[in-house]
Image: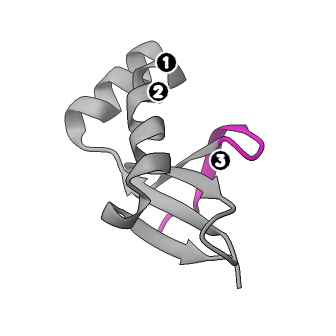
Amino acid sequence: MNKKKLLEKKDWEYYVFEEDSNIELSVPIPNPSPGFDIIYILDESEKEMYLHTGIKALEDRIEDMKINFSNYKMNSWR
């Protein structure tokens, strides 16, 4: 089992991790209380775009995660 590796971050905006050849996007949101990390595993096409273009390829996904957070996996800060 591979360890989760931080690929890139912008504090309080997004964090991108790689683990077991998957790329995970984590977006922190303060509301609803107590705050959550919204988690999404990139599909193959998003992964290729990210590896080719960088974080620019994920801007729409990040915005969608902030707005439609209930459609994603949510990890409570508590």
Choose top left, top right, bottom left or bottom right for residue 43: top left
Residue at point 31%, 62% (across, down): 71
Q: Are marks 2 and 1 in contact (CB under 8 Å)?
A: yes
Judge whether residue 24 can be spotted in this image. Answer: no
Q: Are marks 2 and 3 in contact (CB under 8 Å)?
A: no
Q: Among all residues in the image, which is located at the extreme right?
A: 11
The Cα–Cα distance between marks 1 and 3, rounded to whole angstroms, is 17 Å
At which x and y percent is residue 38? 50, 60
Quick one: label 2 or label 3, which is nearer the N terminus?
Answer: 3
Tell me the number on the disc at residue 59.
2
In the shown orientation, is residue 54 left or right of residue 33?
A: left
The Cα–Cα distance between marks 2 and 3, rounded to whole angstroms, is 18 Å
Q: Among all residues in the image, which is located at the extreme top?
A: 53
* Residue 44 in magenta stretch: no
The residue tagged with tag 3: helix, strand or loop?
strand
The residue that mark 3 highlights is 6
The residue that mark 1 highlights is 56
Specify the amino acid type for callout 1: Lys
The Cα–Cα distance between marks 2 and 1, rounded to whole angstroms, is 6 Å
The residue tagged with tag 1: helix, strand or loop?
helix
The residue tagged with tag 2: helix, strand or loop?
helix
At which x and y percent is residue 57? 41, 21
Specify the amino acid type for callout 3: Leu
* Residue 8 in magenta stretch: yes
Choose top left, top right, bottom left or bottom right for residue 48: top left
Q: Among all residues in the image, which is located at the extreme bottom?
A: 78
Residue at point 69%, 38% (across, down): 9
Task: Report the span colored magenta.
Answer: 1-13
Q: Are marks 1 and 3 in contact (CB under 8 Å)?
A: no
Quick one: label 1 or label 3, which is nearer the N terminus?
Answer: 3
Residue at point 33%, 34% (across, down): 47
